[in-house]
Structure formats: structure tokens, C-alpha cells
Image (cartoon, rainbow, N blue to C red):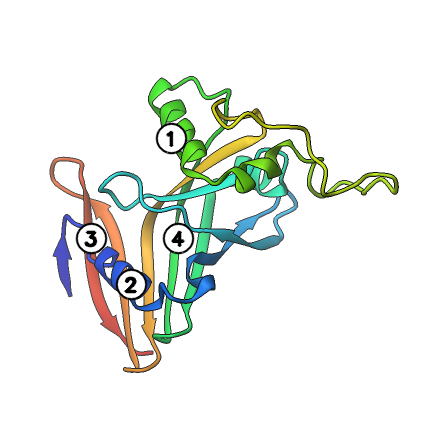
Amino acid sequence: MSSSSAAPWKQLILTSIEANSHLKHYSYFQLATVSSNNLPSNRTVVFRGFENDGDKILINTDTRSRKINDLKHWPFAEICWYFTESWEQFRISGVVDVIDGTNPDPLKLEKREKSWFASSLKSRMQYVAPSPGLPAIATQQPSLSPPLDPSIGPVDAFCLLLLDPDQVDYLNLKTNERLTFTSGAGIQGQKLWTSERVNP
């Protein structure tokens, strides 16, 4: 078992991303939450990068989606990310910070705005579409959405999720190698990671 203040699993992910970046689906992973009735809920989301130079994972979502209620009920979630080219799986669990337009922290609102403008215009358009999960109106034309000024900041429905990992399970099916990474508090309050090789 070894320990480090830097996230030792992050380089593994960056290497996997590089090895699989020629595949369209490399940036998609599953995000599992717990609903208010304590049942599991899972969906596919898009990896939007890491926050600055840290290990927090960025995810864009709609405030009107069910996952927001799930996270308000229970802020813990788990990612399952499988890279098909390199046969690697990452399961990443941690606490999720929900940052919508009502957040009182100006620094978090700045991160939300930055993530908004980093998204394509096509991606931003989904946040002015009808509420997800509600019955579709027969006369409604799904392809038509209200116009969106590309210079205007985030709309109310746009939400940034920040997943702060506390445990990572890495499995490489080509090499039959499995590693677990667990975080704890260091001497000065910083996050300290320990890693251990375990049976696949």
C-alpha cells in the first residue's frame, strides 16, 4: 500500500482518455445516484474535464432533471467509466456539489459560467427546450427551441455538478490488474490518497 497527496489515479484516467480519444464515446460515462425513495438511478452523462488542476470532475446538467432531486436528497454519487479500446474501467465515488444560478458563492457561479461558455451552442440549446421527463405535447415540434444569444451567460436551467472523488476503483481487463484508491485527511487538512493492489 502506498500514499500520496496528489491523486495517483488521475494520470491513469488521462492516459486512458488519450488512448481512447479517437472513439466518439470516450467522454461518456454513467452517473449513479440514489433517489428520494432510496432506489438507484443511473444515466449517461458527458465528461467536461477536471476543475482547474485538481481532481474534481465537471458535469453539466439540467436543473429540471431528476438527478438534481436525487443529489439534494443524497449528495453522494458514483461514476462508472469504461474505455473500450484499452479495456479499462474506473468506478469513482464521491460527494457532488450542485451549482445552479441560485448558489450564493460568486466563485462557484464563475465556474458555472465558465462551463456554460465552454459548451457548444448546440449543447446549450437543450437548456431552453421543454422540461425533460414531462409528457411531450402532440403539437410540439422538438426541433424548434427559443432563440439563444451565444453571448449571454447561463440560463436558469443550466447547472454545473462538481464530483469530488473520495474513492476510485480501477480495473484493467487486458493486464488483469485492479487497484483501489481511497482518500483521507492529511496532517494539514489536505486530501491524502492511499492506493492498494487487489484481486481483480
**Kind of residue at disc 3:** Trp
Please tell me whether mark 3 sits on a helix, a strand or a loop. strand
Residue that numbered label 1 is attached to: 114
Which of discs 1 and 3 lies nearer the camera? The answer is: 1
How far apart are the alpha carbons under marks 1 and 3?
Answer: 29 Å
Please tell me whether mark 4 sits on a helix, a strand or a loop. strand
Please tell me whether mark 1 sits on a helix, a strand or a loop. helix
Q: Is residue 73 visible?
A: no
How far apart are the alpha carbons under marks 4 and 2?
Answer: 22 Å
Instruction: Give the mark, 4 or 2, whose residue is nearer the N terminus.
Output: 2
**Would you place residue 197 above or below residue 136 in this image?**
below
**Would you place residue 76 above or below residue 62 in this image?**
below
How far apart are the alpha carbons under marks 3 and 2?
Answer: 23 Å
Residue 95 in the image: x percent, y percent? 40, 42
- Image quarter of residue 176: bottom left
Residue that numbered label 4 is attached to: 93
Which of discs 3 and 2 lies nearer the camera? The answer is: 2
Q: Assess whether mark 2 and mark 3 are in contact (beta carbons under 8 angstroms).
A: no
Residue that numbered label 3 is attached to: 193
Q: Residues within 10 Å of mark 2 (few under 14, many from 20)?
A: few
Residue that numbered label 2 is attached to: 18
Residue 89 in the image: x percent, y percent? 38, 68
Q: Assess whether mark 2 and mark 1 are in contact (beta carbons under 8 angstroms).
A: no
Residue 99 in the image: x percent, y percent? 45, 30
Q: Residues within 10 Å of mark 3 (few under 14, many from 20)?
A: many
**Would you place residue 56 above or below residue 193 in this image?**
above
**Kind of residue at disc 4:** Ser
Instruction: Give the mark, 1 or 4, whose residue is nearer the N terminus.
Output: 4
Instruction: Give the mark, 1 or 3, whose residue is nearer the N terminus.
Output: 1
Q: How crowded is mark 1: few (under 14 residues within 10 Å), some or many (20 or more)?
A: some
